[in-house]
């Protein structure tokens, strides 16, 4: 797994019903707590935050807006 940086856009890989989050929801890394542990903010289309929580790297998939690793 690549190291995630602040402001990276990620997708959730599992349901977290206790936090009102479902697999596939998109969030933004806002802070690194420890190696492989990130604070992720989930916001609506108007920019209002509806959840912020610490997640492990294995719970996240980085999303890319450009081709990555294509030779």
Image (spheres, rainbow, N blue to C red):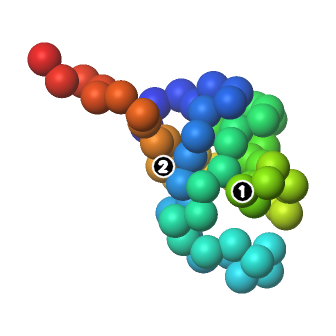
Residue at the spot 30% in from the left edge and 27% down from the top edge? 68
Pick whichever, 18 or 49, lies toward us.
49
Q: Is residue 59 visible?
A: no
The Cα atoms of the two marked residues, 1 and 2, are separated by 20 Å
The residue labelled by disc 1 is: 45
Evaluate if marks 1 and 2 touch, with contact meaning CB atoms under 8 Å apart. no
> Where in the figure is residue 51, as x and y percent of width and height?
83, 61
Q: Quadrant of residue 26?
A: bottom right
Out of 3 and 27, give the one closest to the viewer: 27
Q: Is residue 5 above or below residue 10?
A: above
Question: Could you say which disc has been placed on residue 65 in the image?
Answer: none
Residue at point 48% right, 49% down? Answer: 61
Seen from this angle, which residue lies furthest bottom?
17
**Is 45 situated above or below 1?**
below
Q: Residue at x 78, y 44 (%)?
A: 39
Left/right placement of residue 42 relative to residue 26 reads: right
Q: Which residue is mark 2?
A: 61
Q: Residues within 10 Å of mark 2 (few under 14, many from 20)?
A: some
**Front one among 40 and 65:** 65
Apparent side of residue 21 relative to residue 69 in the rendered image (left or right): right
- Quadrant into which the C terminus falls: top left
Q: Residue 16 sits in which quadrant?
A: bottom right
Of the 4 image quadrants, the one containing the N terminus is top left
Q: Position of residue 63 (x, y in %)?
A: 46, 42
The percent position of residue 22, horizontal first and vertical second, equals 61, 75
């Amino acid at each position: 797994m690549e190291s995630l940086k602040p402001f990276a856009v990620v997708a959730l890989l599992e349901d977290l019903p206790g936090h009102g989050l479902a697999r596939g929801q998109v969030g933004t890394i806002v802070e690194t707590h420890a190696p492989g542990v990130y604070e992720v903010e989930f916001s609506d289309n108007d920019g209002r935050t509806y959840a912020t929580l610490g997640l492990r790297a294995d719970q996240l998939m980085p999303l890319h807006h450009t081709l990555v690793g294509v030779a």
